[in-house]
Amino acid sequence: MLFTDRVQAGRQLGARLAHLAGQDVVVLGLPRGGVPVAEAVADALGAPLDVCLVRKLGVPTQPELAMGAIGEDGVRVLSEDVLRETGVPPDARARVEERERRELLRRAERYRGDRPPAAVAGRTVVIVDDGVATGSTARAACRTVRARGAARTVLAVPVAPPDWTRRLAGEADELVSLATPRGFFAVGQFYDDFAQLEDADVVAVLRRAERRPSRPGRTGAPDTAPPSHSGAPATDPPDDGGAGLDREVEIAAGTVRLGGRLTVPADAAGIVLFAHGSGSGRHSPRNRFVAAGLNRAGLGTLLFDLLTEEEAEDRANVFDTALLAARLTEATGRLRAHPGTGHLAVGYFGASTGAAAALWAASEPGARVAAVVSRGGRPDLAGPRLPDVTAPTLLVVGGADRTVLELNRRARARLRCENRLTVVPGATHLFEEPGALETVTALARDWFTDHMAAAHV
């Protein structure tokens, strides 16, 4: 057994999530089994606790097999594979959904009474369950929370199947599991005590959470007050000194406007612009994970879409390094033109094909880029621009990503600036292995911090 019971698992999970302490966090447990785990996590983070109500849609003839799930606010998730294999007709599916929707409403009234759900808009929301099996309920929970305006979503569980990150890729900004053992067939097999819980157990946990005294980082009982900033889009970086910013922005690039997320901690020494690869954008969960780590280290970040949705449909644009670099250069110029961010040292973080765009932009005359970090990048696509890069450059590649590793070695030979190639043992191209992305984040944080501090002096 991995865990004695849910409480012990929750304490371990809370320790794993310690990097979120002190942030504007709310913890949501999935009833029933996820609630005692969530209570321990909320206590560890000093955060308010509530429930995230979702219901599995079981196949009529095999109720334990999920053909989908529903959540509050009308969220519905269906497993097309299961529906195709089981042949559940639409009318039978509708009856199951109607029954589970009634149960969802009953639980909402039973657990919360007259109290509204905890406010999640603009906050970091940690969704907790006692484990992930098919992922249907977890997916529904993530979509429910995102629909309510969460700024960042973290899905955290004690145990999950080895392929869970592939199944849930893109559903949350951060996926955390303490263990992903082989031979996984049910969550309960990894608990010594996996007793079924009742509604009364959930209510008791929520009442304890309401009575718990406030601590630094805790806001007490779940509240309904919105965050202090509106989060409304801005056409340019706001001109307010660059302290404590965290909002959606739009970056004008020629005739198009590109959506982005600008985060600038108080007294930041620099700001890192992210160049996403292979057609991904500002919602990339891996880049947002790295950005959060840089923010905790006191560095600002701008995650923005290098292409509009229409442009991204043309795959030629995804590999147009010159176009992507031009967008990055334009965004850099707009940040430097505003008093709130103009004084900050600038760094570039490029992933996959975005790394080529970052190096291309850094090679431009007068670029004044303090540092560049490439994650699983394709610096070779920057071609003849590589010798012109003057910014200190860190290339991070997974040890199991052999083709890209060789391309990075060749590209590094053409760099004349300060540079380093760091290999993360056992990691594949997307750094999905346990601890791999955390290693990338630490390497990027140290590289930017060291070189931006020198540029800031």
Image (cartoon, rainbow, N blue to C red):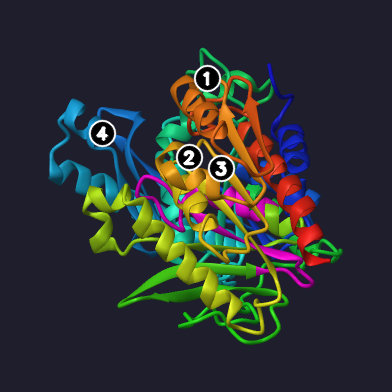
Q: Could you tell me if the residues under marks 3 and 2 are in contact, i.e. CB atoms within 8 Å?
A: yes
Is tag 1's residue or tag 2's residue first in the polypeptide sequence?
A: 2
What amino acid is at disc 1? Ala
Distance in Å between CA atoms under marks 1 and 3 = 16 Å
Is tag 4's residue or tag 3's residue first in the polypeptide sequence?
A: 4
Tell me residue 284's x, y (percent): 46, 51
Q: Which mark is residue 60?
A: 4
What amino acid is at disc 3? Ser
Give above or below for 121 relative to 374: below
Distance in Å between CA atoms under marks 3 and 2 = 8 Å
Give above or below for 235 relative to 332: below
Q: Could you tell me if the residues under marks 1 and 2 are in contact, i.e. CB atoms within 8 Å?
A: no
Residue pointed to by mark 2? 379
Distance in Å between CA atoms under marks 4 and 1 = 43 Å
Q: Which mark is residue 400?
A: 1
Q: Counting other residues with Cα less than 10 Å from the Cα at mark 3, is it few (<14), some (14-19), or many (20 or more)?
A: many
* Residue 392 shows up from this direction: yes
Q: Counting other residues with Cα less than 10 Å from the Cα at mark 1, is it few (<14), some (14-19), or many (20 or more)?
A: some
What amino acid is at disc 2? Pro
Is tag 1's residue or tag 3's residue first in the polypeptide sequence?
A: 3
Residue 395 lies within the magenta run: no
What amino acid is at disc 4? Pro
